[in-house]
């Protein structure tokens, strides 16, 4: 398709996070001649070539994604999410976007729905923080061996990976698993509800820990070892595959035309990494939200003993790349503190919490953000106190003290993971760190991160996953030629904020104490 033909290409992105979802309209439009379109200097290399178009985004719908506890188990409210997606389509049109060229969905990873042979969903998908997988990662590790499992899949050991969820179902003789004909990951499932077409998208499929990292196919040996039917899983398709259009039923219900649907980088982190506005070929990123995902893009998976020992992952990326990264507990720690305080009647907004943290004493204590106890504790502030008590440190008393300890510890953990990423990526040194995602609205965290790593942080765009989702749609529609053009266009459209490091001496000392306490 020629550039003239895409005068204003309109796409709709649904980005579902663990606590909220959003519908974002993207418009890819020509920019005035004379404007070179790439004024943003990330400090990370020479500016890219002039771009002829600019992307603008507009959030047309935002909705909560509240997990639902039923008895002892935690679920996603999948039909509510479908309803909200439909609302998003209707609202986009009410906002004046009548000609939508395509739409796509991305979400968190690892969770799935099971469908019977007639295509009916058999039960509500479980939430990855449900306790059904407690202890099973170790059991599967013994059954298969951690080394062979990592050698095959290249995926990090997280207790909630799809493989352990399936093992849990198998172990308890789940009737649903016995009846299941197909497994669809969350965005695949929602896309199927909209289109009637079943497809398995590869970036998200990689997070199951069942995909072979070298072949990009489901690992038949692993499935057999776990006695899982290979026919449950559909052959993975690359991000950017056209995946049908809204079904006749959905069009009739919503009163909309058959909008084409694309399977983008459906793992939200894959979409976020696609939106990193890097000018340099090799770069480090931090996708910052409920989770912090820090790493780099590589062309081949890194399957070394060191990568296994440091629990790095090689998740599938857009355009056949791999996301060499590590999950860090992220702003979940802050979200859960807030939830505990809200419940106790102490309602403080996120900006208020950050302000209190800014006023609190620096470096009062440190936590290992990735301590297993923080995965899903009953009361996060008490869990943080318990960690500090166990490690002989000061016990934070107030919200401000607690949040300061969390943010400083996250920033220091970013340094650990950044330096390890550099070693795993062949000993290269990154000039700075690109931060994307909603977490960059926490300016204190961006500042602390620049201080902790002793290098610049380039923050933006905050809507990383939605923007990555949009650009892959534009690539599928033929409006953007590839990732280089996409990143140049994103950089021009959403110039990042730069945070320079300061107070380096204090942070160096803090890093030494942090490492001692956390045993890094
Ligand atoms: C389960 C988590 O959602 C996943 O590991 C992480 O990569 C993610 O999707 C962050 O949004």
Image: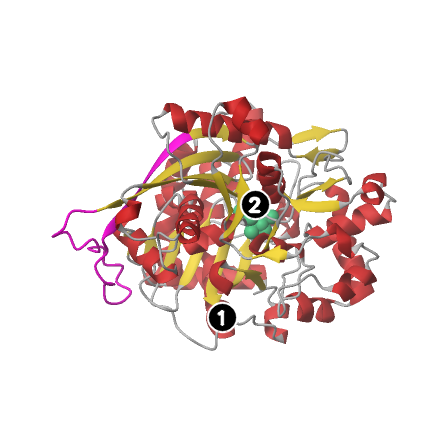
**From what the image shows, is residue 401 above or below residue 61?**
below
Residue 208: x %, y % from top left:
66, 54
- Secondary element at tag 1: loop
Instruction: Check the image and report above or below for 488 versus 260.
Output: below
- CA–CA distance in space, label 1 to label 2: 23 Å
Residue 472: percent from left, percent from top: 43, 51
Q: Do we see residue 291 in this rendering?
A: no
Q: Is residue 56 magenta?
A: yes
Which residue is the site of mark 2? 108
Res 51 → quadrant = bottom left
Mark 1 lies on residue: 299
Q: How many marks?
A: 2
Residue closer to the observer: 420 or 487: 487
- Determine the image quadrant of residue 252: top right
Side of 31 relative to 161 (left or right): left
Asked if the residue at tag 2 contacts the one at tag 1, i.e. Cβ–Cβ closer than 8 Å, the answer is no
Dot 2 beta carbon under 8 Å from ligand 1: yes
Closer-to-camera residue (311/503): 311
Front residue of this view, candidates 351 and 107: 107
On screen, residue 310 versus residue 260, left or right, reads right
From the viewer's perspective, tell me whether residue 93 is left or right of residue 491.
Answer: right
Magenta includes 216? no
Badge 1: residue crowd in 10 Å (few <14, some 14–19, many ≥20): few
The quarter of the picture where the C terminus appears is bottom right
Q: How far across and how far down the image is residue 112, in percent?
A: 67, 44
Question: Which residues make up the magenta segment?
Answer: 31-60
- Most common secondary structure along the magenta stretch: loop
**Residue 165 rendering spot, x and y as whole percentages:** 74, 48
């Amino acid at each position: 398709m020629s550039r003239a033909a895409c005068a204003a290409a309109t796409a709709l992105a649904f980005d579902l996070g663990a606590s909220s979802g959003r519908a974002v309209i993207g418009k890819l439009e020509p920019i005035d001649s004379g404007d070179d379109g790439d004024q943003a200097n990330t400090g990370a290399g020479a500016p890219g070539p002039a771009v002829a178009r600019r992307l603008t985004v507009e959030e047309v719908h935002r909705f909560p994604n509240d997990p639902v506890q039923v008895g002892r188990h935690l679920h996603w409210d999948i039909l509510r999410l479908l309803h909200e997606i439909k609302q998003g389509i209707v609202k986009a049109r009410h906002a004046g976007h009548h000609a939508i060229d395509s739409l796509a969905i991305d979400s968190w990873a690892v969770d799935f729905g099971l469908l019977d042979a007639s295509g009916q969903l058999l039960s509500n998908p479980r939430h990855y923080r449900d306790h059904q997988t407690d202890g099973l990662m170790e059991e599967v590790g013994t059954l298969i061996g951690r080394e062979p499992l990592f050698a095959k899949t290249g995926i990090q050991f997280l207790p909630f990976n799809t493989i352990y969820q399936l093992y849990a179902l198998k172990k308890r003789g789940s009737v649903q698993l016995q009846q299941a004909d197909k497994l669809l990951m969350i965005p695949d499932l929602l896309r199927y509800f909209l289109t009637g077409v079943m497809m398995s998208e590869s970036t998200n499929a990689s997070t199951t820990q069942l995909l072979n990292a070298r072949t990009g196919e489901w690992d038949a040996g692993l499935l057999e070892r776990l006695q899982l039917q290979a026919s449950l899983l559909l052959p993975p398709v690359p991000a950017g595959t056209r995946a049908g259009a809204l079904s006749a039923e959905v069009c009739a219900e919503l009163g909309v035309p058959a909008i084409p649907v694309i399977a983008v980088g459906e793992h939200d982190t894959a979409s976020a990494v696609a939106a990193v506005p890097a000018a340099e070929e090799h770069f480090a990123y931090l996708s910052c939200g409920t989770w912090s995902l820090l790493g780099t893009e590589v062309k081949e998976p890194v399957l070394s003993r060191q990568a296994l020992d440091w629990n790095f992952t090689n998740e599938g990326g857009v355009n056949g790349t791999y996301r060499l990264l590590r999950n860090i507990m992220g702003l979940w720690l802050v979200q859960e503190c807030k939830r505990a305080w809200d419940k106790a009647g102490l309602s403080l907004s996120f900006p208020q919490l950050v302000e209190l943290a800014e006023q609190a004493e620096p470096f009062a204590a440190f936590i290992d953000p990735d301590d297993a106890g923080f995965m899903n504790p009953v009361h996060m502030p008490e869990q943080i106190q318990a960690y500090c008590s166990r490690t002989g440190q000061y016990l934070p008393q107030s919200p401000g003290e607690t949040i300061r300890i969390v943010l400083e510890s996250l920033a220091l953990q970013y340094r650990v993971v950044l330096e390890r990423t550099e070693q795993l990526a062949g000993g290269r040194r990154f000039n700075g760190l690109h931060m994307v995602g909603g977490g960059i609205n926490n300016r204190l965290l961006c500042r602390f991160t620049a201080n902790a790593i002793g290098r610049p942080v380039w923050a933006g765009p905050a809507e990383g996953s939605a923007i990555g989702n949009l650009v892959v749609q534009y690539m599928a529609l033929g409006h953007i030629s590839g990732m280089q053009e996409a990143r140049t266009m994103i950089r021009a459209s959403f110039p990042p904020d730069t945070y320079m490091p300061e107070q380096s001496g204090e942070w160096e000392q803090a890093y030494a104490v942090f490492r001692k306490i956390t045993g890094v």
